[in-house]
Amino acid sequence: MSDKKEIFADGIGQIHFAGGMVRYDFVTLQPAENGEAPTSQSNVRIIMPPQGFLAAFNSMQQLIDKLLEAGVLQKNEAANADK
């Protein structure tokens, strides 16, 4: 078995384009000591060329379509109507 590093993220804090590259800042939620809502903390940045970003986006869209077909996700029609 190959050695692969596994990274967990609760989500993406920011996506931005700088220096000709697309940059994703992944975040994890950190609990507050006083019981308030957790805060997000940036922990990993992925940097890729625009072509890699488009390929990743297409892969994600294909997975979203499969999850919709399987009933794991549902379209939010109200959000689409607001646009």
Image (cartoon, rainbow, N blue to C red):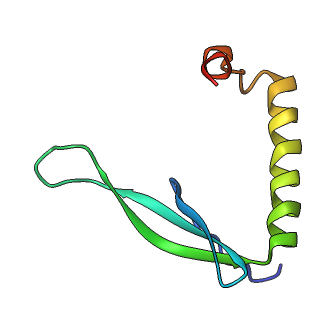
Give me the residue at 86% from left, 34% from top.
Answer: 65
In the figure, is residue 44 to the left or right of 63? left
Residue at the spot 81% in from the left edge and 82% down from the top edge: 2
The quadrant holding residue 77 is: top right
Q: For this view, does 13 lie left or right of residue 78?
A: left
* Quadrant placement of the C terminus: top right
Nearest the eye: 33 or 47: 47
Q: Residue at x 60, y 19 (%)?
A: 82
Where 37 falls versus 13 (above or below)? above
Instruction: State which quadrant residue 46 falls in.
Output: bottom right
Q: From what the image shows, is residue 63 above or below residue 13? A: above
x then y, percent, for residue 18: 63, 78
Name the quarter where the N terminus is drawn: bottom right
Figure quadrant of residue 42: bottom left
Give the percent coordinates (x, y) of residue 6. Answer: 64, 71
Residue 47 drawn at (x, y percent): 68, 78
Towards the viewer: 73 or 83: 83
